[in-house]
Image (cartoon, rainbow, N blue to C red):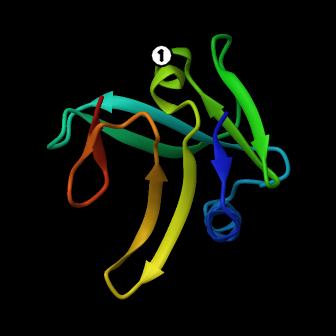
Amino acid sequence: MIKVSETAKKKVIELMQDDGYNPNTDFVRVGVKSGGCSGLSYDLKFDKENQEDDKVFEDNGVKIIVDKKSFLYLIGTTLEYSGGLNGTGFVFNNPNANRTCGCGESFSL
């Protein structure tokens, strides 16, 4: 399962509405792909439909879909949003990551 913090929820809803998505029916697709300075990077986008092999979750009012392969890397992850002076953006707190890069956008196991 993937958790969503309160600050991430607010930003997700705002961005979904700005992009023409409905937060009540559409999804946030979270995935993992090869790349980044640590070997694996996070992929985050909006989607209107889920695929047959997707895992579907809802936390804090946000519907999340994860493909089967990415799910193994993301179990227990919390999606947060940081809006501080050191930069703004979504942050993945992933308990499975052994190492993350300085920007927090990639990780390794």
> Is residue 18 rendered to the left or right of residue 104?
right
| Residue 27 versus residue 81 in the image, above or below | above
Measured as percent of width and height from the top left, residue 2 is found at 64, 40
56 or 78, which lies in front? 78
Which residue is located at x 42 percent, y 41 percent? Answer: 43
43 or 91, which lies in front? 91
> Is residue 28 rendered to the left or right of residue 85?
right
Query: Does dot 1 land on a helix, a strand or a loop?
Result: helix
Residue named by callout 1: 69
Disc 1 packing (10 Å; few <14; some 14–19; many ≥20): some
Measured as percent of width and height from the top left, residue 107 is found at 28, 40
| Residue 101 versus residue 73 in the image, above or below | below
Which part of the image, by quadrant, shows the C terminus? top left
The quadrant holding residue 23 is bottom right
| Residue 10 versus residue 26 in the image, above or below | below
Which residue is located at x 58 percent, y 37 percent? Answer: 76
> Is residue 109 rendered to the left or right of residue 80?
left
Q: In this view of the protein, can residue 50 be seen by the observer? A: no
62 or 76, which lies in front? 76
> Is residue 84 rendered to the left or right of residue 19?
left
Amino acid at dot 1: Lys
Measured as percent of width and height from the top left, residue 78 is found at 58, 49
Which residue is located at x 21 percent, y 34 percent? Answer: 35
Q: In this view of the protein, can residue 90 be seen by the observer? A: yes
